Amino acid sequence: MLESQQRSSYTGALSPEYALLGFLALREAHGYGLHQQLVQELGQVWHVSLSQTYNILGRLERQGYISGSMMPQDKLPARRTYHLTQAGRRRFDQWLQSPSGCSVHAIRVEFSTRLYFALLLQPGYADELIDLQVKVVQGGLQRMRKALSCMPPEQTVNRLGLSLRIRQLTSVAEWLTECRTALGPAHDMER
């Protein structure tokens, strides 16, 4: 993937919209239910208010990735139920097959979300997803180490900042190895 394509994918992917698309790939749901599922299943990854969830759902519907319809309820007001459109499914599947950016934040939120849905929807893909992310992280570490070696010694704060990023990504690389071990051979997720 070209670096500019990777960067634009990376920027857009740091939104919980892909988690919402993923939940809708599993089954149709109403906004409050989607928010509750996001909090229960990925609450340590994403911190999103109910109003943010509804704003994202509105945007996704305007963009044609989801479609909503009013569903009547006994003795309650009608509720809007959402389902994934074909365009939304293509967008989600493309995202699921892509690596996350090479930053601690991107891996914490985006990769973790990808791994969650890979395990639910394509369990055999989880190992490949981890391998792909390890390659991205190793490439990023290589570039950062090269940049550090070329940086003038008098740029102390820049050198310290880059050194910290290298240490963080090294820790992420170790964590990715732990992911494979934690998943085990069966890739069973306790829910």
Image (spheres, grey):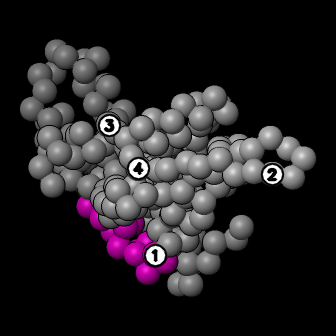
Tell me the distance, in whole angstroms, between the alpha carbons under discs 1 and 3: 24 Å
Tell me the distance, in whole angstroms, between the alpha carbons under discs 2 and 4: 25 Å
* The quadrant where residue 106 appears: top left
What residue is shown at x 28% (from left), y 30% (from top)? 162
Mark 3 is on which residue type?
A: Thr
- Within-10-Å neighbours for mark 1: few <14, some 14–19, many 20+: few
Which of the marked residues, 3 or 4, is nearer the chain's N terminus? 3
Which residue is the site of mark 1?
A: 122
* The quadrant where residue 177 appears: bottom left
Q: Determine contact: label 1, label 3, CB under 8 Å.
A: no
Which residue is the site of mark 4?
A: 65
The picture places residue 129, in percent across and down from the top left corner, at: 37, 67
Which of the marked residues, 2 or 3, is nearer the chain's N terminus? 3
Mark 2 is on which residue type?
A: Gln
The picture places residue 169, in percent across and down from the top left corner, at: 36, 45
Task: Identify the secondary structure beneath mark 3.
Answer: helix
Which of the marked residues, 1 or 2, is nearer the chain's N terminus? 2
Residue 157 as seen in the image, left or right of residue 148: right
Mark 1 is on which residue type?
A: Gln
Residue 100 as seen in the image, left or right of residue 146: right
Mark 4 is on which residue type?
A: Tyr
* Range of residues picked out in magenta: 122-135
Which residue is the site of mark 2?
A: 73
Which residue is the site of mark 3?
A: 11
Asked whether residue 118 is drawn in magenta, I would say: no
